[in-house]
Image (cartoon, helix red, strand yellow):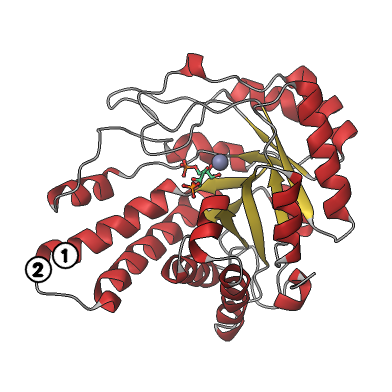
């Protein structure tokens, strides 16, 4: 093992999820692709006193480099501590494709991993999720698996394209795999194009409630939960960007879920939109600007402010970790 997550100051998600479920909030899992996004996330969460999961996809890991990712995560811990904040911080592999990928991430400082077997049949999903959990647990790394399929990233997503999680399958799945948390499909979807403008997006809250009765207290994860803030879409378009008209998951649809066993909510697209709006705004209003600190700095600042608002309005995790309460 090259970097043990504990030496980097990181935490796994076990205590985080327990605390979240006991206190009626959800832990934000925000994806990052570079240093400025990591800073936006950790500064925002530390200022709000919210625990945070720094989430890194396989593509993001390839982009940043496997040596860089653990150093950025360690820097995140140091930034929070230098701000006087005790928030726990996890480094989590998003949508881990295989056991090999998971082993490599554990070797390089990840404290939590997802094994995404959602596209396999039930038995194969159980087999690979169990294998991942048995391996990761030897290193005190927590594991998220997924049951049910979210609709695709592209195009006009309609509810029929989802394969909603079957509540009658969840108990068997978690007991046979031994995973620590379960991502479910109740109508969220990945990317910026979730629902047509003018529609009234609704999640399948009844499926969530049924799942909760089958596995009481077990940490549930929601992927694809970006709101696609129209202010960022408008700014991007105003300054030359091209985006299809679309809306995301309304805050009101998520807020109730955080009060239940939903312990982790994944948001990536909103951060990308905020960051891009910030960069485009500088390019659009100051065409002579070529200092990366100016345009990346504006991207970072928009992302940070948006996430602080989202923590207050959606996650309910504000103040969950005040200094000295861990
Ligand atoms: O769920 C997918 C995440 O938004 C990561 O996206 O693979 O483009 O980094 P990515
Ligand atoms: P969004 O595309 O809605 O931000 O979802 C992100 C996600 O689920 C990452 O795993
Ligand atoms: Zn996802």
- Asked if residue 13 can be seen in this view, the reply is no
Estimate how packed mark 2 is, as few (under 14), some (14 to 19) or many (20 or more) residues with alpha carbons within 10 Å.
Answer: few
- Asked if residue 117 can be seen in this view, the reply is yes
Residue sitting farthest toward the top: 160
Q: Quadrant of the C terminus?
A: bottom right
Q: Quadrant of the N terminus?
A: bottom right
| Residue at 48% in and 18% down | 159
Tag 2 near tag 1, CB within 8 Å: yes
- Position of residue 64 relative to residue 248, above or below, is below
Give the image location of residue 288, x and y in percent. 9, 74
Q: Nearer the viewer, residue 280 or 15?
A: 280
Disc 2 to disc 1, C-alpha distance: 5 Å
| Residue at 28% in and 24% down | 198
The image's mark for residue 283 is 1
243 vs 146, left or right, is: left
The residue where tag 2 is placed is: 287
The image's mark for residue 98 is none
Give the image location of residue 290, x and y in percent. 18, 75
Residue sitting farthest toward the bottom: 82
Q: Quadrant of residue 174?
A: top right
| Residue at 42% in and 47% down | 269
| Residue at 57% in and 85% down | 82
Q: Nearer the viewer, residue 235 or 289?
A: 289
Give the image location of residue 139, x and y in percent. 85, 61
Q: Considering the numbered disc 2 on the image, is that residue within a helix, a strand or a loop? A: loop
- Position of residue 202 relative to residue 8, above or below, is above
> Within 8 Å of ligand 1, the CB of disc 1?
no
Give the image location of residue 18, x and y in percent. 77, 52
Estimate how packed mark 1 is, as few (under 14), some (14 to 19) or many (20 or more) residues with alpha carbons within 10 Å.
Answer: some
Q: Considering the numbered disc 1 on the image, is that residue within a helix, a strand or a loop? A: helix
């Amino acid at each position: 093992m090259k970097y043990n997550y504990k030496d980097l100051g990181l935490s796994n998600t076990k205590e985080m999820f327990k605390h979240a479920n006991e206190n009626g909030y959800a832990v934000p899992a925000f994806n990052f692709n570079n240093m400025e996004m990591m800073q936006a996330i950790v500064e925002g969460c530390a200022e709000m006193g919210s625990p945070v999961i720094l989430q890194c996809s396989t593509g993001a890991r390839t982009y940043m480099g496997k040596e860089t990712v653990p150093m950025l995560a360690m820097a995140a811990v140091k930034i929070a501590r230098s701000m006087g904040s005790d928030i726990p911080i996890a480094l989590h592999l998003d949508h881990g494709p295989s056991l090999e990928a998971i082993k490599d991430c554990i070797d390089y400082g990840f404290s939590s991993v997802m094994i995404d077997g959602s596209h396999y049949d039930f038995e194969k999903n159980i087999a690979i999720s169990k294998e991942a959990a048995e391996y990761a647990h030897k290193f005190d790394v927590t594991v998220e698996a997924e049951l049910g399929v979210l609709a695709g990233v592209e195009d006009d997503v309609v509810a029929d394209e989802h394969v909603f999680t079957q509540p009658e399958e969840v108990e068997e799945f978690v007991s046979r795999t031994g995973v620590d948390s379960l991502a479910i499909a109740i109508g969220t979807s990945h990317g910026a194009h979730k629902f047509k403008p003018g529609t009234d997006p609704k999640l399948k809250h009844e499926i969530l409630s049924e799942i909760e009765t089958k596995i009481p207290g077990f940490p549930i994860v929601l992927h694809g939960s970006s709101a696609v803030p129209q202010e960022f879409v408008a700014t991007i378009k105003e300054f030359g960007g091209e985006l299809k008209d679309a809306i995301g998951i309304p805050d009101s649809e998520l807020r109730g879920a955080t009060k239940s066993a939903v312990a982790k909510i994944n948001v990536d697209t909103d951060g990308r939109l905020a960051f891009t709006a910030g960069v485009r705004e500088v390019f659009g209003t100051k065409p002579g600007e070529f200092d990366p600190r100016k345009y990346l700095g504006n991207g970072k600042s928009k992302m940070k402010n948006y996430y602080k608002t989202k923590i207050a309005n959606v996650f309910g995790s504000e103040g969950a970790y005040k200094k000295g309460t861990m």
